[in-house]
Amino acid sequence: MLPLLRLIWTLIKIGLGLVLGLILLVGYGIYANGAAERNGREFCDSLVSTGNFEAALAQAQREGIRFYKTEQPESYRFVFQGWVFNAGICQAEVEGTAIRSVRFWMETD
């Protein structure tokens, strides 16, 4: 009977470990997505208050924020990575060196 109890106790520990791992994984996902949304919104708000696109690019490079030019002329996207396939996107429409408009959204897959 003792080996059977040991086996059951081992299976319970493995099950609890898997459940705890899943809880931690989901918790991190929630944290990462929230951080991406918060950081992206703050960056977009700073673009509105600054209004200078060159300063925005310098800030993005300093802070290690990924950005790229879109297919539309004078439009750039700044990417704030969330968990796995989620990201906060701040899109800036630029006219010369002035920021014309910004828009923020979360992308998920």
Image: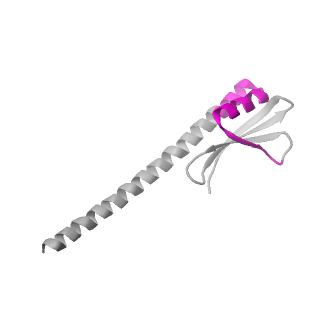
Percent x, y for residue 56? Answer: 73, 30
| Residue at the spot 44% in from the left edge and 49% down from the top edge | 27
Residue farthest toward the left in the current orientation of the protein: 1
Q: Is residue 11 above or below residue 59?
A: below
- Identify the image quadrant of residue 10: bottom left
Nearest the viewer among 101 and 10 is 10
Percent x, y for residue 69? Answer: 79, 43
User: Which color scheme is applied?
Assistant: one colour
Side (left or right) of 51 relative to 41: right
Side (left or right) of 100 relative to 28: right
Percent x, y for residue 25? Answer: 45, 53
Does the magenta run of residues contain 95? no
Placement of the C terminus among the 4 image quadrants: bottom right
Marker count (numbered): 0
What kind of secondary structure does the magenta stretch mostly adopt?
helix
Q: Is residue 32 above or below residue 1?
A: above
Placement of the N terminus among the 4 image quadrants: bottom left
Residue farthest toward the top in the current orientation of the protein: 50
- Identify the image quadrant of residue 81: top right
Percent x, y for residue 44? Answer: 68, 34
| Residue at the spot 36% in from the left edge and 59% down from the top edge | 19
- Identify the image quadrant of residue 54: top right
Nearest the viewer among 48 and 12 is 12
Query: Which contiguous range is marked in magenta?
Result: 43-71
Side (left or right) of 34 relative to 69: left
Q: Is residue 73 above or below residue 61?
A: below
Does the magenta run of residues contain 67? yes
